Amino acid sequence: MVEDARARQILESELRLLTRQLRSSPAEVEELLAPEFIEIGQSGRLWSRSDIVAALADPEFSAALATFEITEERVILIAGDHYLLTYLLVIQQGRSRCSSIWKCTASNDRMIFHQGTPVG
């Protein structure tokens, strides 16, 4: 459950990253991903920030998220200005448990890590 303003802001940023409109704008994606960002994809592949920015700009890659639903969202403070967001993502191809780590400062919130794990 999302309870405070910071948590709502993190969830809103995550949701923006799931939209086709934002994914088609590399500059906007880069604003939300920290320079040191990495992702462990559902296949186990390790993605760098530049890998993800390029992949998200590809309409075929992003087509899987044409429609989505998230539930069970939870944001917790893990240390200092770092927050962990977890949720269940449901898309046409199936479901996955997702986790993201966000670094939040006075000037911006940026994702530094993301992982999606398929749910059988």
Image (cartoon, helix red, strand yellow):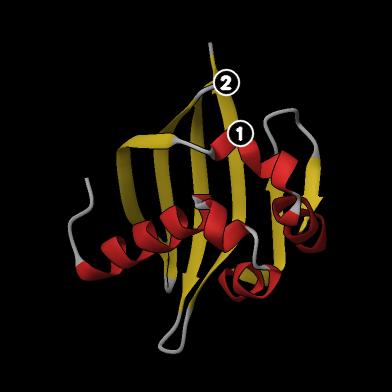
Q: Which mark is residue 64?
A: 1
- Residue 33 x, y percent position in the rendering: 62, 67
**Count of picture labels:** 2
Is 101 located above or below residue 82 in the figure?
A: above
For image coordinates 58% across by 28% down, the residue present is 117
For image coordinates 74% across by 28% down, the residue present is 43
- Is disc 2 placed on a helix, strand or loop? loop
Q: Amino acid at mark 2?
A: Gln
Mark 2 — residue?
93
For image coordinates 78% across by 49% down, the residue present is 47
- Residue 91 x, y percent position in the rendering: 49, 28
Quarter of the image with the N terminus is: top left
Q: Answer left or right for 107 relative to 3.
A: right
- Residue 66 x, y percent position in the rendering: 53, 38
State the residue lying farthest toward the top: 120
Q: Are marks 1 and 2 in contact (CB under 8 Å)?
A: yes
Q: Amino acid at mark 1?
A: Ala
Q: Answer left or right for 114 relative to 15.
A: right
